[in-house]
Image (spheres, grey):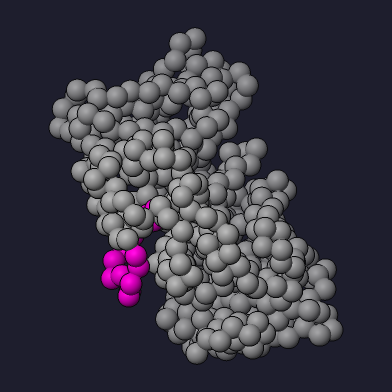
Amino acid sequence: MSANINILQIGKVDWNEVYTLPENVTLDYVDSLEGELNKEYDMVFLDRTPSDAETEMLYRLAKAYTVFVTDRVDVRGRTEWLCRSRKAQRIADSDIQRFLKEESRYYFTRPYGEKFKLQDLAIAQGFHGKVKWNGNYSVELEGDYGEEFRQVAYWRFSNWMLKGEVADFWTEYEKDITVQVLFEFTLFAMGTSVILEQRELRDEDMKQVIRMESTQGDGILFVSVRAKGRGRVKLIALHKRLSRGDHGFFLPGGERYVSAQREEAFCYFDPADLKPPLSVYFAGYKTAQGFEGYYMMKNLGCPFLLLYEPRLDGGAFYMGSEDYEQMFVDMIKKHMDELGFTSDQLILSGLSMGTFGAMYYGSNFRPHAIIVGKPLASIGNVAANEKHLRPGGFPTSLDVLKYQCGGMDRACVEKLNNKFWKKYEETDWGHSKFAVAYMIEDDYDMDAYASMLSHLSADGVQAYGKGFHGRHNDNTDGIVNWFLAQYKKILREDFARGME
């Protein structure tokens, strides 16, 4: 069943009288905006030029990428500002009916994404080659698969797809050139063996996101991997997200980047009022896929950029190959350039895993401020602490160590630590300000704050922090409250934003 979509239409003619709407779409028509509307809308259509007062109301009401204007709208003055700040799009009269019927369903309110669990991956009984499990990162198969495609693995627990659901799938895998692989997606009617839809996808098909729709009824999706030839196949991940069609990823306007190794990174940009600063927020460790901190950053009132990466179980600390890391640099630079901002009009921020991204890429930009809560810098130590200080507390840290450095011995721990500190120490932080909330008895990276201070040698840098008693996850509310208080303080004092 498709999600309900709420649309606000402003104009001189009620589109309910003109167009046919899908059953799940509700369109509220008003000829003028008066007072505050008590409803949240997924899309806004402007069919006439709004007044300046209406423009201010629409700015507060509408989300970026969800405003559409017809040719009857004069895009000048405050309306031009509104269209820039809300990333409005033109829509032709001839396309309105098709858009309402076919595209509106992608503007649902709540995004969702998940990674199929690696522990749910089963090896086919007919495969007699070598099998190697690399923690929760990957499974490697090596052997002779034969001259015809044969099943080598499958996910044990099938995935529900309700009628009308559209989902995007992405696979991470590696293979020898002597092996061909085929991913088979089969949608069975609920409770039966009747096939509603089946897709067989080879290497050339897997270069793009795989989009599937359950058109005939509620179903159960079964995913199988087949191979032929001889050599090695590494199965890394299978991701599923509710599709936004061609309108973004996770949120309307969400951007997706992919490295040569099929590793993904995402960003979401909201221009807000187009005035400095640009606030960048790196998501923390999260198994439910999607952007983090949307409403928190939106409520600050300034332009913001959300960054997110879905590798491993809930993120791999934004580190990787040179081209992977360059993607994050490019995301930030692209949106700084769009706004016309410089580094002294940039704030980088994050909580927990996101603090690493903020500080690590802070070295590339030397921003006006870095605001972080529960900082993690020596990621090798975070993994090493899993054995004695925090047994079973954050096992993904061991996957991160093995993934980033290829091993788990002391040399790898130091190598991963130094990856951060070398970059941090070589940066002239003389024009930056650090605001840090930290846990005094942190069981992830207990020396992060002290190490940050001791490695700051630039003249003019400002750094201050507040410690909270407890382990890493003992007082998240206190950390977040202080984190937001520093954001508001810096916006008020350094950028003349009148926030209470």
Q: Which is more toward the observer, 89 or 418?
A: 89
Q: Residue 325 at x, y = what percent?
A: 68, 52
- Residue 297 visible within the image: yes
Q: Which is more toward the observer, 29 or 376?
A: 29
Name the residue: 41% across, 37% down.
Answer: 95
* Image quadrant where one finds the N terminus: top left
Name the residue: 58% across, 28% down.
Answer: 175
Q: Is residue 252 left or right of residue 360?
A: left
Name the residue: 62% across, 64% down.
Answer: 357
Give the magenta part as a residue range. 32-45
**172 in magenta:** no
Decide: is 213 above or below 248.
above
- Residue 426 quadrant: bottom right
- Residue 18 quadrant: top left
Decide: is 142 above or below 314.
above
Q: Is residue 484 left or right of residue 276?
A: left
Please tell me how many numbered marks the rendered image carries.
Answer: 0
Name the residue: 59% across, 83% down.
Answer: 497
- Residue 314 visible within the image: no
Name the main secondary structure of what is drawn in magenta: loop
Q: Residue 55 at x, y = what percent?
A: 47, 67
Q: Residue 474 at x, y = what percent?
A: 43, 80
Q: Which is more toward the observer, 276 or 452?
A: 276
Q: Residue 282 at x, y = what percent?
A: 56, 64
Q: Which is more toward the observer, 390 or 434?
A: 434
Decide: is 372 above or below 268.
below
